[in-house]
Image: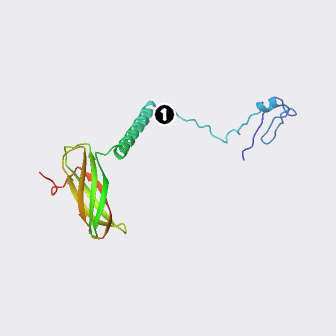
Amino acid sequence: MTPVVLLCERSCDTHQLNVGHHCSPETEEDAEVAQRVLPEGRYSKQTRKPLSKWARWALLAVAVAIGAVIAFVGYRNLGTKPIEAKQTAFTIIGDDQVKVSFEVSRDQPERAAVCIIRARSQDGDEAGRREVLVPPGNDVVVETTVLRTSKPPVTGEVFGCSYQVPAYLSTT
């Protein structure tokens, strides 16, 4: 623990104060005058050099670049998607088929799209999958397809959609 030296306006018995020797203030005003003084030579007086003008601009540029990257990634991940689909209905036709109806919303209705529809069995496994071509048309299109399954289906759902239509599904 660092010893504390108290210096008072009044001297204690007119002696010079040493480390560890304290004078007790007589009034509250005297207590405010007392200060903590560190022993000389024990602690170095380090001063921080201020950043140069160039370093400040470099830090500002890095901060702006990082902010731009975060904004771009957030927009790409949280912004509106160019094509979205949701299941509107499904009907189990038998132990090996399910009929799925789905709605596709897209920002470029003049482009064809492909949607992957899948069926799931009781244990959660994928029991069937099918790619469905959504031809160019309206902004919002309702499609229906029948899936064959390898296990008895319990649900049919839309896995996802894309504008990257495989050549074997293309009508052109």
Instruction: Let me know if residue 94 appears in the view.
Output: yes
- Residue 78 x, y percent position in the rendering: 37, 45
**Quadrant in the picture for residue 6:** top right
Q: Residue furthest right?
A: 13
Instruction: Let me know if residue 157 appears in the view.
Output: no
Mark 1 surroundings within 10 Å by alpha-carbon count, few (fewer than 14), some (14 through 19), many (20 or more)? few
Identify the residue position indicated by label 1 in the image: 51
**Quadrant in the picture for residue 108:** top left
Relative to 168, is 23 on the left or the right?
right
Vertical position of residue 73 compared to residue 166: above or below: above
Vertical position of residue 4 compared to residue 129: above or below: above
- Residue 141 x, y percent position in the rendering: 24, 48
Identify which amino acid the numbered label 1 is placed on: Leu
Relative to 141, is 69 on the left or the right?
right
Q: Residue furthest left?
A: 172
- Residue 146 x, y percent position in the rendering: 23, 61
- Residue 113 x, y percent position in the rendering: 22, 50
Vertical position of residue 147 compared to residue 165: above or below: below
- The colour style of the image is rainbow
Vertical position of residue 116 compared to residue 35: above or below: below
- For image coordinates 79% across by 33% down, the residue present is 31
> Residue 145 or 11: which is nearer the viewer?
145
Element under disc 1: loop
